[in-house]
């Protein structure tokens, strides 16, 4: 817990000069936090025989309706074969609709169906509950610091994609 002066209120450590052990602990905390963050959607998706790739595709199609398959490939950082397998399932199950591009017939634009929007809402609600509670407990300074850490850890290309999504949501 930061005290606002760059030190931890737990042990007075200066956060600018972390030891390898402190960094290892942060890495482990990130792994366990990710497990918690994904646990709720995983429980929802398991009965549908879907995984995290399906969740990520649904999330980003919802964030950018009409996005192209190529754009989604870039956002997700998966192979075309992997994404096509996920999209085929989501389309066959009536959660995603693929439309041929108006200006470029080779492009496929992706949209969530009503059922897809309902599933996306359910998955996001589960994660929002967890995030809201954690943010409330941590406080506004910790939340701002957490966002800064996450954004700084992103590869430049991913950060650009993230910032573009952020701009389009406002």
Image (cartoon, grey):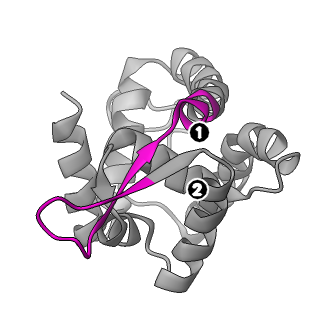
- Left or right, 134 with respect to 105, comes to right
Which segment did they paint magenta?
Answer: 98-119
Q: Quadrant of the C terminus?
A: top left
- Residue 116 part of the magenta-drawn span: yes
Looking at the image, how many numbered discs can be counted on the residues?
A: 2
Q: Position of residue 115 (x, y in %)?
A: 61, 33
- Asked whether, in this view, residue 106 is left or right of residue 78, the answer is left
Please determine whether, in this image, residue 170 is positioned above or below residue 48: above
Which element type, helix, strand or loop, lies under badge 2?
Answer: helix
Q: Secondary structure at mark 1?
A: loop
- Residue assigned mark 1: 11
Q: Would you say 85 lies left or right of 45 here?
A: left
* x 23%, y 32%: residue: 169
Foreground pick, 145 / 162: 162
- The vertical placement of 170 against 55, above or below, is above
Task: Describe residue 83's horizontal placement relative to residue 98 as left or right.
Answer: right
User: Which residue sits at x=59%, y=44%?
Assistant: 95
The label on residue 29 is: none
**Front residue of 25 and 97:** 97
Q: Is residue 66 above or below residue 133?
A: below
Tell me which residue sits at (59%, 39%) in the image: 11
Q: Which numbered disc flags the more N-terminal residue, 1 or 2?
A: 1
Asked whether residue 62 is in view, the answer is yes
Residue 110: say if magenta: yes
Q: Residue furthest left?
A: 103
Residue 59 at what x, y percent from top left? 49, 45
Asked if residue 3 can be seen in this view, the reply is: no
Numbered tag placed on residue 91 in the rendering: 2
Residue 92 % position (x, y)? 65, 57
Say which quarter of the image contains residue 25: bottom right
């Amino acid at each position: 817990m930061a005290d606002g002066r760059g030190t931890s209120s737990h042990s007075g450590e200066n956060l600018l000069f972390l030891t390898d052990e402190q960094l290892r602990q942060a890495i482990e905390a990130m792994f366990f936090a990710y497990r918690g963050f994904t646990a709720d959607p995983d429980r929802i998706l398991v009965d549908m025989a879907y995984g995290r790739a399906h969740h990520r595709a649904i999330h980003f199609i919802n964030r950018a309706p009409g996005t192209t398959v190529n754009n989604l490939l870039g956002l997700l950082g998966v192979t075309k074969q992997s994404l096509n397998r996920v999209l085929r399932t989501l389309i066959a199950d009536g959660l995603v609709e693929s439309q041929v591009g108006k200006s470029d017939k080779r492009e496929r634009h992706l949209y969530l169906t009503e059922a897809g929007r309902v599933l996306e809402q359910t998955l996001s609600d589960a994660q929002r509950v967890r995030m809201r509670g954690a943010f409330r407990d941590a406080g506004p300074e910790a939340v701002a610091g957490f966002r800064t850490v996450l954004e700084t850890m992103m590869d430049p290309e991913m950060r650009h994609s993230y910032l573009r999504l952020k701009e389009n949501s406002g």
